[in-house]
Amino acid sequence: MDRAIYDRMAEIDAEHWWFAARRRIVSALIRDQVPLKPDAEILEVGAGTGSNLTMLQGMGHVDAIEPDARARALASRRAGIHVEGGMLPDRVHLEDGHYDLILLLDVLEHIGDDHGSLRVLRGKLRPGGRMVLTVPAAPWMWSAHDVAHHHKRRYTARTLRAAFDAGGLHVRHMSYFNTLLYPLIAAARIAGRLRHREGSDEAMPSPLVNRVLERVFAAERHWVTRGTLPFGVSLLAVVEPAPR
């Protein structure tokens, strides 16, 4: 991503409604879908500025990799761990068969070879290990936000499942999410196109609006951790190695 994007994320990702609600949803998803022992080995791939690491440290021992040096340094300070450099699919120097849980939270869409990257990470899982992923959905929503964040694609349930199949992974659970706010976000994207001016998705709303949006979005954790939603701005999935 552009340097300005990382800097802006570092300023807002602790409080912004989207980041805060996604952490609550992912935390609930892990609790419901990933059996972890207290000494679980956890890896976050593409840790960014480290806003998820403290949450994960409450679940086990956490490693992390992040290709951007400045974001990596901030993540290391935030979490009190050494965040490694690395980039999928070819520059991930981690032990095979080591991790009980691997997370890619809005990372896969940045990678040209998503299939190959999933195959690499499959090899890092222990027997019984699982991966938790989130990605942007609804390709028709492609916007200046995707360009600024250097996205390669937005997924549908079909294309994401195909990527898992190619990566040797079996889907245990998958659902769209960010569904309740979908009409609002869709309207904003359409309005931006009609005006030929798309706003920043990283804009910090007023404290009241931020609290309301977080509560609405985070409420979806009660549905998507076990059930499914038929559409949404994003997709989440829990996968495991497919039998060879």
Image: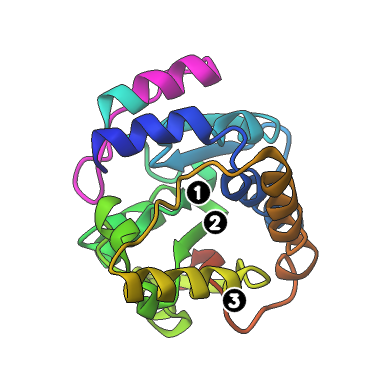
Using the image, tell me which numbered label, if any, was put on residue 23: none
Residue at left offset 44%, top offset 36%: 9
Residue 214 drawn at (x, y percent): 70, 50
In-front residue for pair 209/243: 209
Circle 2: is it few (<14), some (14-19), or many (20+) Cα within 10 Å?
many
User: Is there a contact, CB below 8 Å, between mark 2 and mark 3?
Assistant: no
Report helix, strand or loop for mark 3. Answer: helix
Predominant SS along the magenta part: loop
Residue at point 26% right, 43% down? 1
How far apart are the alpha carbons under marks 2 and 1? 5 Å
Pair 1/3: label in front = 3
Q: CA distance from mark 1 to mark 3?
A: 28 Å
Amino acid type assigned to the residue bearing label 2 in the image: Val
When the figure is inspected, residue 91 is found, relative to residue 33, above or below; the finding is above
For label 2, the SS is: strand
Instruction: Point out the tag, 1 or 3, that comes first from the N-terminus.
Output: 1
Which residue lies under the disc numbered 3? 183
Q: Is residue 210 magenta?
A: no
> What residue did someone put label 1 on?
103
Q: Is residue 143 above or below residue 190?
A: above
Q: Are marks 2 and 1 in contact (CB under 8 Å)?
A: yes
Determine which residue is flagged by label 2.
132
- SS for tag 1? strand
Would residue 28 be found to the left or right of residue 8 on screen? right
Three-letter amino acid code of the residue under disc 1: Leu
Residue plotted at (41% across, 47% down): 124
Which span is picked out in magenta?
A: 72-93
Q: Earlier in the sequence, mark 2 or mark 3?
A: 2
Q: Indicate whether residue 87 is drawn in magenta.
A: yes
Of label 2 and label 1, which has the lower sequence position? 1
Quarter of the figure with residue 210: top right
